[in-house]
Image: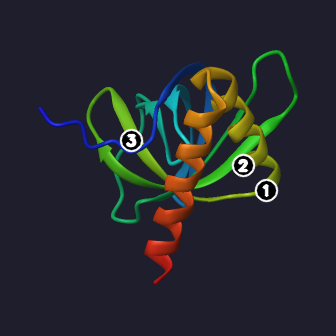
């Protein structure tokens, strides 16, 4: 199988809140990248034709909350795969730092940030 991901995912497990016009659910973050997030599928969640959701979670041992607007990319009975479409500057800064601490090298982080900037530029054209 060919790997299609352009961004490194880091394992990160923490409780999260998933919000949609149809309701609010508790989920758990399983992994993160600068572009997306993998959540556990809440037991009482059902998919909607509107695939836009808000996701929020706190960093471990902290009151720092990350908030992001996402789009559901794929789901199954266990997981929701979400693409980040909008993230406020403070949350983006914390997400960048979290990835930075987990990827290990500045070079790899800068490559990830360049890819993200190129992707966002391409999407806006």
Q: Give the structural element (helix, strand or loop) at label 3.
A: strand
Q: Which residue occupies 40% across, 65% down?
A: 50
Q: Give the structural element (helix, strand or loop) at label 2.
A: helix
Report which residue position mark 2 lands on: 92
Report which residue position mark 1 lands on: 89
Looking at the image, residue 85 lies above or below residue 108: below
Seen in the image, is 104 located left or right of residue 75?
right
Whether residues under marks 1 and 2 lie with C-beta atoms below 8 angstroms apart, the answer is yes
Q: Which residue occupies 36% across, 31% down?
A: 79
Instruction: Rate crowding at label 3 as few (under 14), some (14 to 19) or many (20 or more) other CA atoms within 10 Å.
Output: some
Instruction: Rate crowding at label 2 as few (under 14), some (14 to 19) or many (20 or more) other CA atoms within 10 Å.
Output: some
Q: Residue 113 location, x and y as percent?
A: 59, 49
Which is more foreground, mark 1 or mark 3? 1
Report which residue position mark 3 lands on: 81
Q: Locate the N terminus by quadrant.
A: top left
- Residue 78 seen by the camera: yes
Q: What residue occupies the far right of the structure in this picture?
A: 63
Instruction: Rate crowding at label 1 as few (under 14), some (14 to 19) or many (20 or more) other CA atoms within 10 Å.
Output: few
As rendered, which of 115 and 12 lies closer to the eye?
A: 115
Q: Residue 11 location, x and y as percent?
A: 51, 20
- Total marks in image: 3
Mark found first going from the N terminus, 1 or 3: 3
As rendered, which of 88 and 100 lies closer to the eye?
A: 100
Q: What residue occupies the far top of the structure in this picture?
A: 61
Q: What residue occupies the far front of the structure in this picture?
A: 107
C-alpha distance separating marks 3 and 2: 19 Å
- The disc placed on residue 42 is none
C-alpha distance separating marks 1 and 2: 5 Å
């Amino acid at each position: 199988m060919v790997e299609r991901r352009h961004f490194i995912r880091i394992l990160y497990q923490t409780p999260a809140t998933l919000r949609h016009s149809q309701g609010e659910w508790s989920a758990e973050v399983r992994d993160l990248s600068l572009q997306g997030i993998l959540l556990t599928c809440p037991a009482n969640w059902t998919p909607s034709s509107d695939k836009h959701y808000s996701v929020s979670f706190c960093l471990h041992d902290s009151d720092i909350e990350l908030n992001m607007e996402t789009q559901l990319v794929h789901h199954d009975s266990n997981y929701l795969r979400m693409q980040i479409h909008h993230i406020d500057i403070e949350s983006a800064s914390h997400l960048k730092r979290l990835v930075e601490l987990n990827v290990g090298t500045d070079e790899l982080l800068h490559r990830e940030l360049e890819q993200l900037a190129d992707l966002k530029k391409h999407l806006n054209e």
